[in-house]
Structures are given as structure tokens and as C-alpha cells.
Amino acid sequence: MPRALWLLIIGMTVNVTGNSFLWPLNTIYIHNSLGKSLSVAGIVLMLNSGASVIGNLVGGSMFDKLGGYKSILIGIGITLLALIGLTFWHQWPEYIFFLTIVGLGTGVIFPSMYAMAGSVWEEGGRKAFNALYVAQNLGVAVGSALGGIVADYSFQLIFLANTILYVLFLLIAVFGYRNISVSNLRKSSKMKEKATTKKVPNLQALSILCVGYLLCWVAYVQWSTTVASYTQEIHISLSQYSLLWTINGALIVLGQPLLHGILKHFAKALKTQMLIGIVIFIISFLVAAKATAFSGFLAGMVILTIGEMFIWPAVPTVAFSLAPKGREGFYQGIVNSTATGGRMIGPLLGGILVDKFGMPMLFTVLITLFVVAIFTTVFYDRSLKSKKSVQAS
């Protein structure tokens, strides 16, 4: 891998480690420490994710216009200011304001990092995106493990730890990303004209794919929201719950050699790879729906992790292949904003369903969403195949 990609991997790991001190525990903190209902917690997380959706779209466009270095620094600056505020003021309602600004800042960062990864190692294909995905989950494993231990001692230290790690991320970005050159920022007029001709059908295909991607994230995020709160009700400790996310991240990192061997068979069949992942997601939620003890949720998390290893790196890879030259950042912004949109809708939808109808109804709805996602994944590229057929004739 190129040196520039290694720098992006290190930065992503530090970034997500800091975030993972807090995000798996947000619902628990709002519900248990601040005394708000799951529906209210869902609204707060929806505001955080809504701001992140805006940040994703803005950050992707900024990458295309300003380059990755400036875009990432702007995102880090916004996030760091909000985290400093959250460290000192994390009661109600200040928590809402600062958490929303954190969402905006982190949203700016992610599409630029993914677009830079694809640009600095285009010949690597999915390997560049999978490398960042692994880095994210290494951060999840470390951050959530330490976060659960720290939270058992004091929630206030959670906010401080997040802030310190973002200062470290800022230093990595300032000294490491300045000289990373991205070749797609200056294109000839002929290439731009060619990109415009294929923009509409490719964007349509990505939009259809992202509908299913959104639904998968709506379901997935329940593990850090409604399921997290439910585990507390059945007396699973915070450290045990955080261990689930540690196992999630560790499996993703340690399972890469085995996964690499399996995914060789899907080199030209990303659609099949994604469909298998969705089916595995369904199995994981069926297991979680029957769980009444830590062992059941552990089994569900292991299965869930296998599913996400198939899906999450595949979607940005498809987006990068669909993106016209000079629009890589915008297309990655769409993918990241879709995932964030799922994290925005999921907590509110899940909170309402659990408050009104209970956990069994929640799992029924989530499995239905996965079935819909299967259909959108099957048909997302139909317009592209039709276009190729017309051109061939």
C-alpha cells in the first residue's frame, strides 16, 4: 500500500477510537444519566446524524473543490471545538447542541478520507476502502473497550478522552496529509465532458443502491441504541455491552486474512457479496430477537460482524467505480450521508417502536427492511445494463 494510504489509515484509527468512546454509549447516557425516554434519545441522535448528513455532502463537495487536506482540517476544527464544549458542558440541553455540532464536523471528514484513499491507490480497487474500513473497526474495538471501562468509573472522562484523541488526529492531519496529492482535482475539458455524459445513469444507480444501504444502517444502528438500552434492562453490565463492540472490531481486524480469501471469489461480483451480507444480517437479528442473556447477544454480534464485513466496504467501492472523474468526493459524500441518514432515522424509529410496541415488533420491522434492501440491491444497476445494451446495438 502507498505511504499516503497508511497515513490515512492511522488517522482514521485515531479518529474512530475517539468517537467510539462516546457513540455506543450515547443512548445509555441520555436515557439513564440524563433521564430522558428512548424516543427523546432517538431525536437527539437524529439531530446529530442529520448534521452529519449535511457535513457528508458538504465535505464531499469540498474535496472536489479544495482537496482532501483542507477539507479534513476544517472538519477536525469544527469537531474539536464542539468536543471541548462537550467536555465542560454535557448536561441537558447543552448536550444536544454540542453533539449536533460534532455530527457536522465528523461528517465533513469521512467522505474526504474515503475519496483520498481511492485516489491515492486507484489500482488497489476495493483494497483501499477495505483498509479504511478495517481502520475504523480497529478504532471501534479499542475505543469501545476503553469507553465501557471508563464509563463505569466516570462518564465525564469519556468526553475528555474523545477530545484528547481528536487533538492527536489534528496533529496527524496537519503534518501527514499536507503533501498528499490527489490527481483527480485537475481534469481536462474533454474528460469533464465525458464525465457529464455518464453522470445521470450512474447517479441513478447509486441512488437506488443507497436506498437499501440506508435501510441496512437503520437496522444496524439499533445495536448501539435500542438494543443497548434493552441490555441494561436485562442486567447486562456496561462493560459487557461495550465488549460486544470490542469483539465486533477485533473480528473485523483479525478476520481479514480469511475474508480476503473468500472475497477473491467476488472480485467481479460485488452485488453478490452485498446480497450475502444482507442475508447474514437477517440471521443475526433473528438470533438477537431470541436472546435473553449475554451469550445470545454475543452470538448475534458475531454473525452481524460477518455480515457487515461483506457489505460496508463494498458500497463505497461501487460508488468510486460509478463516480465520473472529478466527482469522487461528491459520490463518497452521498454514500457517507446515506449511512449517516440511517443512523439518523434508526434511533428515532427504533425508540418509537420499542416505547409503543416493544422489542418483538422492532425486530419484525427490521427484518422487513432487510428484505426490501435485497430487492434494491438486486435491481440498482438495471439502468446501467439497459444503457450498455442500447450502446451495443
Image (tube, helix red, strand yellow):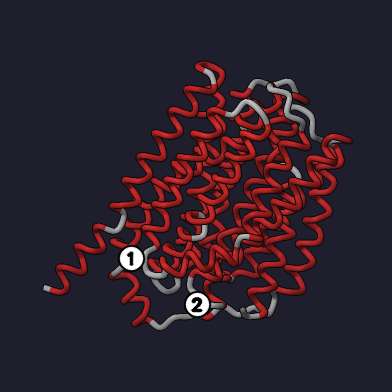
- State the mark number for residue 122: 2
Determine the secondary structure under disc 1.
Answer: helix
Q: Left or right? Give the position of 366 relative to 268.
A: right
How busy is the neighbourhood of tag 1: few (under 14 within 10 Å), some, or many (20 plus)? some
Give the image quarter of residue 50. Answer: top right
> Disc 2 versus disc 1: distance between alpha carbons?
19 Å
The answer to whether mark 2 and mark 1 are in CB contact below 8 A is: no
Return the x and y of residue 282 as percentages of the image width and height.
45, 40
Where residue 46 appears, x then y in whole percent?
A: 57, 35
Classify mark 2: helix, strand or loop.
helix
Using the image as rendered, state which of residue 332 and residue 31 is in the foreground: 31
The residue at 58%/44% (across/down) is 51
| Residue plotted at (52% across, 16% down) | 356
User: Mark 1 highlights which residue?
Assistant: 199
Disc 2 or 1, which lies upstream in sequence? Answer: 2
What's the amino acid at mark 2? Glu
Check the image and name the residue furthest to the right.
153
- Up/down of 321 relative to 334, above or below: below
Q: Is residue 62 visible?
A: no
Q: Residue furthest left?
A: 393
- Measured as percent of width and height from the top left, residue 198 is found at 30, 68
Which corner quadrant holds the C terminus? bottom left
Q: Position of residue 373 (x, y in %)?
A: 38, 44
